[in-house]
Image (tube, rainbow, N blue to C red):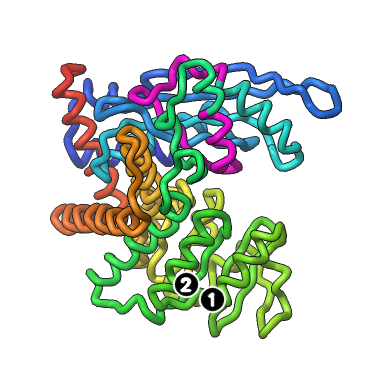
């Protein structure tokens, strides 16, 4: 929370925002907290808390994911909602920023229990959702199936509304390409950065912390572009092979319900801990798990020259400063992982039009949007002599501030 506020304050100072605009942009428009009673398969009742925070809608309907996690309290959701405001503005999407969460660990819950919780949560917040009001998407511990349940529950109350959520199954109105969009988007931004630096992405050695939807798709996209993925990890630990890993084999392991650590001992693959993975001798580091993981305690030991933030705020402000002082280029989360909301925008527009794109068009549009956003951010950073993070926040904040003024809020 403090990290996001610090980055906003830095951008506001750089832009010389007036106090009235700062006050509007520095707080949320609406915060909903609800009780979510869940009947367990055992017959017992558990009561958890659910939230939906709508930070700013000056540029369009609210957009943001829903996460099921013990740390998804109001403060966390509030910070993530503001990140979505700046992210959608940076990508010039016609959305505002929101986030949702249920304060629960779903890993021990059955499928039926998660479905009942999802439906109860949706019913509790449906009055603040809408195709042109607020459109949820998947996030930590939620997926296409959870979105399908949310869509169905909302539709029971309001009539069939395919555009009410994004990240749905393709068979239920989802967009071909959306599942891979966040990971692929991060790689498109990295490719644009490499072109700017005059570095060939082919042959770059990459370590990825986190092998969920973002990390695994980033790994696949990196291999497609000729990079070498030397290390990946999940919640159980990591694997490393200096000559490069067989990413498809690891994806197969995880898809079958396993962990990447089951590959240890095969074909020269060794184990590596999650903290140690961050400090490997690689060209590019992609933190794509939960943050923060790069802090003032380890930032001076990061050997990668480029850090691409696949996760939300994986780097603390103090760690960020150490990396900047050392000349490490950090591609900030609101740019690096913006492929997800960009893909959601494509899905939303297709649902409204009831017209489906081919995946080739989806991926081409995604690459164009992400590389364009990187170029705009790099130009701002060069012109102002600031980091990519400060530039990205400043661009996003400036666009929202302009919308706020045009609407007459200040």
Q: Which residue is mark 1?
A: 230
Question: Residue at (46%, 19%) from the top-left corner?
Answer: 159
Q: Nearer the viewer, residue 196 or 18?
A: 196
Is residue 124 shown in magenta? yes
In the rendered view, would you say 266 is above or below 144?
A: below
- Circle 2 packing at 10 Å, graded few (<14), some (14-19), many (20+), is many
Task: Locate residue 266, reporting x and y percent.
Answer: 70, 81
Q: Please indicate whether residue 258 sits to the left or right of residue 66 in the image.
A: right
Kindly indicate whether the residue at mark 1 contacts the one at mark 2 (C-beta within 8 angstroms).
yes
- The answer to whether residue 325 is seen in the rendering is no
In the rendered view, would you say 396 is above or below 56?
A: below
Secondary structure, mark 2, is strand
Question: Residue at (72%, 23%) from the top-left corner?
Answer: 38
Q: Which residue is mark 2?
A: 206
Magenta stretch?
Answer: 123-151
- Circle 1 packing at 10 Å, graded few (<14), some (14-19), many (20+), is many
Task: Locate residue 334, reporting x and y percent.
Answer: 36, 47
Is residue 405 shown in magenta? no
Q: Quadrant of residue 13?
A: top left
Task: Locate residue 352, reporting x and y percent.
Answer: 33, 32
Q: Quadrant of residue 388?
A: bottom left
Q: Earlier in the sequence, mark 2 or mark 1?
A: 2
């Amino acid at each position: 929370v403090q990290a996001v506020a610090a980055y906003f304050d830095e951008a506001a100072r750089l832009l010389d925002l007036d106090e009235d605009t700062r006050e509007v942009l520095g707080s949320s428009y609406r915060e909903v907290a609800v009780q979510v009673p869940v009947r367990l398969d055992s017959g017992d009742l558990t009561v958890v808390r659910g939230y939906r925070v709508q930070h700013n809608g000056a540029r369009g309907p609210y957009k943001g994911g829903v996460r099921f996690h013990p740390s998804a309290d109001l403060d966390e959701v509030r910070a993530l909602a503001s990140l979505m405001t700046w992210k959608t503005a940076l990508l010039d999407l016609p959305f505002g920023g929101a986030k949702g969460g249920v304060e629960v660990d779903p890993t021990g819950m059955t499928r039926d229990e998660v479905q009942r919780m999802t439906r109860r949560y949706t019913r509790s917040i449906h009055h603040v959702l809408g195709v042109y009001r607020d459109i949820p998407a998947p996030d930590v511990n939620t997926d296409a199936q959870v979105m399908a349940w949310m869509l169905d529950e909302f539709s029971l109350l309001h009539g069939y509304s395919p555009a009410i959520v994004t990240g749905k199954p393709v068979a239920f109105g989802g967009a071909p390409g959306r599942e891979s969009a966040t990971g692929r988007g991060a790689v498109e931004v990295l490719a644009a950065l490499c072109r700017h630096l005059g570095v060939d992405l082919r042959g770059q050695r990459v370590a990825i912390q986190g092998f969920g939807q973002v990390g695994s798709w980033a790994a696949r996209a990196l291999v497609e572009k000729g990079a070498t993925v030397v290390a990946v990890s999940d919640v159980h630990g990591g694997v490393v092979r200096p000559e490069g890993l067989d990413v498809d084999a690891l994806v197969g392991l995880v898809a079958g319900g396993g962990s990447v650590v089951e590959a240890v001992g095969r074909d020269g693959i060794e184990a590596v801990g999650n903290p140690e993975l961050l400090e490997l001798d690689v060209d590019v580091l992609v933190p794509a798990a939960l943050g923060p993981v790069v802090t003032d305690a380890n930032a001076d030991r990061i050997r990668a020259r480029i850090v691409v933030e696949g996760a939300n705020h994986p780097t603390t402000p103090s760690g960020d400063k150490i990396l900047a002082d050392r000349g490490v280029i950090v591609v900030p989360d609101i740019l690096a992982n913006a492929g997800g909301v960009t893909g959601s925008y494509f899905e939303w527009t297709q649902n409204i039009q009831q017209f489906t794109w081919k995946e080739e068009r989806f991926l081409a549009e995604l690459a164009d949007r992400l590389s364009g956003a990187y170029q705009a951010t790099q130009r701002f950073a060069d012109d102002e002599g600031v980091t990519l993070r400060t530039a990205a926040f400043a661009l996003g904040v400036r666009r929202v501030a302009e919308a706020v003024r045009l609407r007459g809020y200040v």
